[in-house]
Amino acid sequence: MSLEKGEHEDKIEEKIGTERELTPEEIAAQMNDADYSFRRLGGFWKKFVTVICVIWSLGQLYTAAFGTFPSTLQRAPHLGFALVLIFLLYPAKWAKRTNQVQWYDLILAGLAAFCALYHVVCYEGIIERAGDYSQTDVIVSIIAVLVVLEATWRIAGTVITMMGVIFLTYAYFGPQMPGFLAHPGFYVSRITTFQWLGTEGILGIPMDVSSTFIFLFMIFAAFLKKSGIGDWMTNVAVGITGSATGGPAKAAVVSSALQGTISGSSVANVVGTGSVTIPLMKSIGYRPEFAGAVEAAASTGGQLMPPIMGAAAFVMTEMLDIPYWEIAKAAAIPALLYFTGIFISVHMEAKRTGLKGIPKEKLPDWKHLLIHQWYLSLPLVGIIVMLTVGFTPMLAALLGVGLIILIAMINPKTRLGLRDLIDGLED
């Protein structure tokens, strides 16, 4: 919750500490959020995952600085890194939940890495064959499709995975379909190579967006959090609204809106602000279910808040060929209306149940934070300006990361050391 280790921030922790802050694991349990239900590895595997994460992030920063690779050379390794991490960090649905990596996880991670590297090593041959794919191409494609389905099952659950399976089988069993659903059908070789070796299947537009815009903004958000800027925004929101009727719930709404401007992720938003606001809401009498619901609803709206929005905004930019800033501007009014509706809802609930705010002496001094640490808002202002004047989202995010590191150097308490930089790339 606090920015770092300064006296003023320690004082804030003492004032707000009416209840113990929640860990990401506890928040995930309360919110029933699968995105944070991953293994907590230790020893060699923890270091191994850290190395993978840092290499992945550095690779993405390299392509942002010096230009992206050709389509599949950019997208396949990007997906390969993700798949390897999924199999190391997320247990299989049918297996007993454990923090130990299993032998079959290693096999699946190896197959995922192999399929991604196949694109890199055999890139010219794949381009030259262009439709006349070899038996090796088909085998690799079948493995890749199965590996992606298993990873999807671990992350997104049964429903999304079954939708993928249904459409894949529909492509094969077309002649057996009734009426207008019937079609000539495709061979397994055609289905799988289309999905893996081209740019219209698994490695399509969403993967293009993920491997360029989205990942860079995730790095930007991670460094904002690591530098203490995200916590600074949460403390300002709590200080301004905490003393009002139902103040902690209103603080959850405002802080989620502010966090949404820098993260674009509902999950990151919940973990970033919920560790403060959920205990605060419970401390003044809000039901745990209501506290969790407020944080979940408010954090979901973070995906709508410009300038950094969720993945859908970048997909819209790519598919509709509309500048990202135009989409961000269009999202501003719906986002404000969304948060206004939640703000009114928590106010009415507080009035109905007679809940008060938190005494001002127990809240962060938001005026002190704004006067003495106003410069922490510069990275966010800078990225808005860059997007406004026409910088590409990738370049704006890259320069935004550099700006965060420079701004954090101003204050020794927020200064990022080598360990902080590594942690930011890992996050």
Image: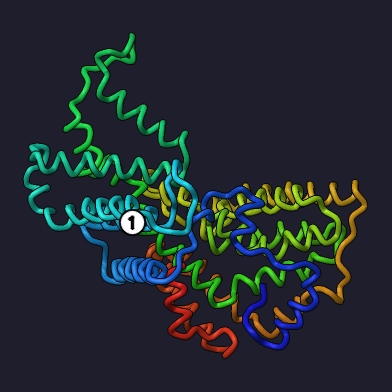
Q: Can residue 150 be seen in this view?
A: yes
- For badge 1, the amino acid type reads Val
Q: Where's residue 236, x and y in %?
A: 71, 72
Give SS at disc 1. helix
- Label tally: 1
Please say if 4 is above or below 199.
Answer: below
Residue lying furthest right in this view? 354
Q: Which of 225 and 419 is in front in this view?
A: 419
> Pointer 1: what residue?
84
Q: Where's residue 382, x and y in %?
A: 51, 73
Q: Residue at x 53, y 83 (%)?
A: 408
Q: Which residue is drawn at 64% across and 80% down?
A: 374
Residue lying furthest top in this view? 179
Please say if 330 is above or below 368.
Answer: above
Q: Which of 411 and 296 is in front in this view?
A: 296
Q: Nearer the viewer, residue 147 or 300?
A: 147
Q: Which residue is drawn at 87% across and 58% down?
A: 245
Q: Nearer the viewer, residue 400 or 24?
A: 24
Q: Where's residue 227, x and y in %?
A: 54, 77
Quarter holding residue 94 = top left
Q: Residue at x 59, y 76 (%)?
A: 228
Describe the colour scheme in one phrase. Answer: rainbow
The crowding category of the residue bearing disc 1, from other C-alpha atoms within 10 Å (few below 14, some 14 to 19, many at least 20), is many
